[in-house]
């Protein structure tokens, strides 16, 4: 046994500190929390002996022989799992972070059979959500996962959250123990130690905000309300539940009176009326006044489909100024993610606390340029702005694990598969059940029908029944 293999826990902590795997300052965790202590074990691949020591200590923490598979949570824990596998001769499986777009599309690589018991290996646990993501994919392959061994428990709720999801976590160290050791070894000051301790005490993650992150598609709208951080999304969900409707009508008419008449007709059956205010020929502030009063009497929200896409300053002006003064009446607006954080910061600065933004991640139009990377980046961006973002405009279930966001899906019609300008339509059932839509946007399917009221009722019933079937 060499020097590293015989390390005690406190020596291990010191070695990790020396290689800069433990940092103090202002950092962000993977799930976006600010933290005065950051644990980054990736560097350990540069210290093979220490890596081996850690793997051996982790192996001794549990009775490894009861498992017939090992799986490290990608990526940091993969080398630790590899060494544990080599030492114990228990085979390993690997979870892909993204399914391959080609070939087998497998999420779990390696040889396994249904019913095998797999030990999960992870470096550091904050909420436990990374472990659960891995477990979810393993469980989909009928691999049993009920225990995880981890180096560091940040004591922020991960253990309880994992327990709720049927996983017992064995940790080598808690964050409090870690700072205590560093303090005793004179590597950090009493001030730093107490900063970390008060951070731990104040930053517990509530398990109920994490537990159902599994699949919004299976959750009822009632269950999703607590996850909606944005007030616009919250209000929309409340209206949807009260009126039993997930229909949004696109009032793409050019005459103000026609829009008001349409709003009166479809009002009882919708949760939201969507406008393109710049196509209205006879726009007048009175029109907005009347539209708002109809919205109030039938209890639906107004969404301006402005699709903001510009530098922050211009977007602010487009939102608040000009003849339309959008921010004074539309509590929901759409925006492209193309201009990134600066656009959302700009909107945030001039939004009321009830404004909700729907971010475009995909379009219904044929040949549009959104690629997979752009879609994923859009979801990531939205997750950083949970206060502002009410949902995502898209055509597929891109964000199953965000129950607080609503999926708004346009391109819905019963009697047509498209128009002559690239629009593509799906049926109401398809949009809700297969494509993941929470709210369907129907424009010409209703506005060009002889009886908008009757048609809106028909779409409302079909869409709501599809939703009920989805969550059943
Ligand atoms: O049902 P339609 O085709 O008459 O109208 C669909 C409405 C229009 C589009 O501007 C809008 O939905 N839309 C959007 C939105 C809402 O942003 C995105 C998209 O990908 N496709 C789409 O049609 O008002």
Image (tube, helix red, strand yellow):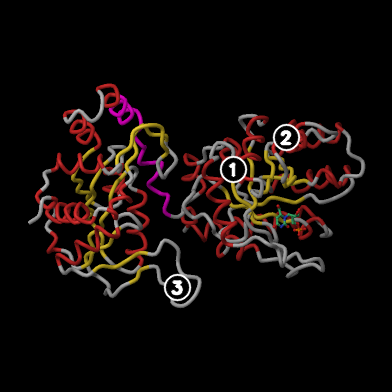
Tag 3 residue: 105
Spot occupied by residue 314 in the image (x, y as percentages of width and height): 75, 37
Number of labels in the image equals: 3
Whole-number angstrom distance, CA of label 1 to CA of label 3: 31 Å
Using a 10 Å C-alpha cutoff, classify the residue at mark 3 as few (fewer than 14 neighbours), some (14 to 19) or many (20 or more): few
State which tag comes first along the sequence, 2 or 1.
2
> Of helix, strand and loop, which one carries label 1?
strand
Quadrant including the N terminus: bottom left
Q: Residue at x 58, y 58 (%)?
A: 465
Using a 10 Å C-alpha cutoff, classify the residue at mark 2 as few (fewer than 14 neighbours), some (14 to 19) or many (20 or more): few
Residue, far right? 282
Whole-number angstrom distance, CA of label 2 to CA of label 3: 43 Å
Give the number of the disc on residue 249: none
State which tag comes first along the sequence, 2 or 3.
3
Question: Does 440 lie within the magenta span?
Answer: no
Spot occupied by residue 319 in the image (x, y as percentages of width and height): 74, 36
Task: Identify the magenta region.
Answer: 195-214
Spot occupied by residue 131 in the image (x, y as percentages of width and height): 32, 53
Residue 418 in which image quadrant: bottom right
Tag 1 residue: 390
Residue, far bottom? 103
> Of helix, strand and loop, which one carries label 2?
helix
> Of helix, strand and loop, which one carries label 3?
loop
Whole-number angstrom distance, CA of label 2 to CA of label 1: 22 Å
Q: Residue at x 88, y 48 (%)?
A: 254
Q: Residue at x 56, y 37 (%)?
A: 230
Tag 2 residue: 313
Q: Is residue 189 above or below residue 47?
A: above
Residue, far top? 191
User: Closest to the observer: 466 or 311?
Assistant: 311
Side of 278 relative to 9 (left or right): right
Q: Residue at x 69, y 42 (%)?
A: 333
């Amino acid at each position: 046994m060499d020097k590293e293999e015989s390390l005690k826990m406190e020596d291990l902590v010191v070695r990790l500190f020396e290689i800069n795997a433990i940092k103090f300052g202002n950092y962000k965790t993977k799930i976006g929390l600010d933290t005065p202590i950051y644990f980054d074990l990736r560097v350990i691949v540069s210290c093979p002996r220490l890596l081996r020591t850690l793997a051996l200590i982790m192996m001794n923490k549990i009775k490894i022989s009861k498992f017939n598979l090992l799986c490290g949570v990608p990526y940091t824990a993969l080398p630790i799992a590899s060494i544990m596998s080599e030492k114990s001769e228990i085979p390993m499986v690997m979870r892909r972070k993204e399914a391959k777009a080609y070939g087998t599309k497998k999420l779990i690589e390696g040889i396994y059979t249904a019913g095998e018991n797999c030990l999960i290996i992870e470096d550091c646990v904050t909420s436990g959500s990374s472990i659960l993501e891995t477990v979810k994919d393993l469980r989909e392959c009928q691999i049993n996962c009920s225990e995880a061994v981890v180096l560091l428990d940040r004591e922020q709720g991960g253990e309880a959250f994992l327990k709720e999801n049927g996983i017992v976590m064995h940790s080598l160290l808690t964050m409090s123990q870690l700072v205590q050791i560093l303090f005793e070894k004179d590597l950090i000051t009493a001030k730093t130690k107490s900063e970390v301790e008060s951070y731990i005490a104040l930053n517990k993650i509530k398990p109920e905000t994490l537990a159902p992150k599994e699949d919004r598609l299976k959750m009822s709208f009632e269950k999703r309300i607590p996850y909606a951080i944005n007030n616009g999304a919250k209000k929309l969900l409340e209206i949807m539940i009260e009126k039993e409707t997930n229909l949004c009508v696109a009032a793409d008419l050019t005459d103000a009176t026609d829009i008001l008449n349409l709003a009166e007709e479809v009002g009882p059956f919708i949760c939201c009326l969507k406008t393109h205010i710049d196509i209205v020929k006879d726009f007048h502030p009175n029109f907005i006044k009347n539209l708002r009063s109809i919205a109030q009497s039938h209890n639906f929200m107004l969404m301006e489909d402005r699709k903001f896409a510009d530098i922050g300053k211009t977007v602010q002006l487009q939102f608040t100024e000009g003849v339309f003064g959008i921010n004074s009446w539309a509590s929901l607006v759409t925006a492209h993610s193309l201009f990134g954080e600066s656009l959302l910061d700009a909107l945030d600065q001039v939004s009321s606390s009830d404004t909700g933004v729907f971010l475009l991640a995909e379009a219904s139009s044929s040949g549009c340029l959104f690629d997979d990377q752009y879609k994923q980046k859009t979801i990531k961006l939205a997750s950083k702005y949970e206060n502002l973002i009410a949902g995502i405009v898209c055509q597929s279930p891109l964000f199953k694990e965000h129950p607080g966001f609503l999926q708004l899906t346009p391109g819905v019609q019963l009697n047509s598969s498209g128009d002559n300008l690239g629009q593509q339509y799906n049926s109401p059932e398809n949009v809700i059940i297969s494509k993941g839509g929470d709210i369907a946007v129907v424009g010409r399917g209703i506005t060009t029908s002889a009886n908008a009221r009757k048609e809106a009722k028909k779409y409302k019933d079909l869409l709501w029944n599809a939703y009920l079937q989805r969550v059943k």
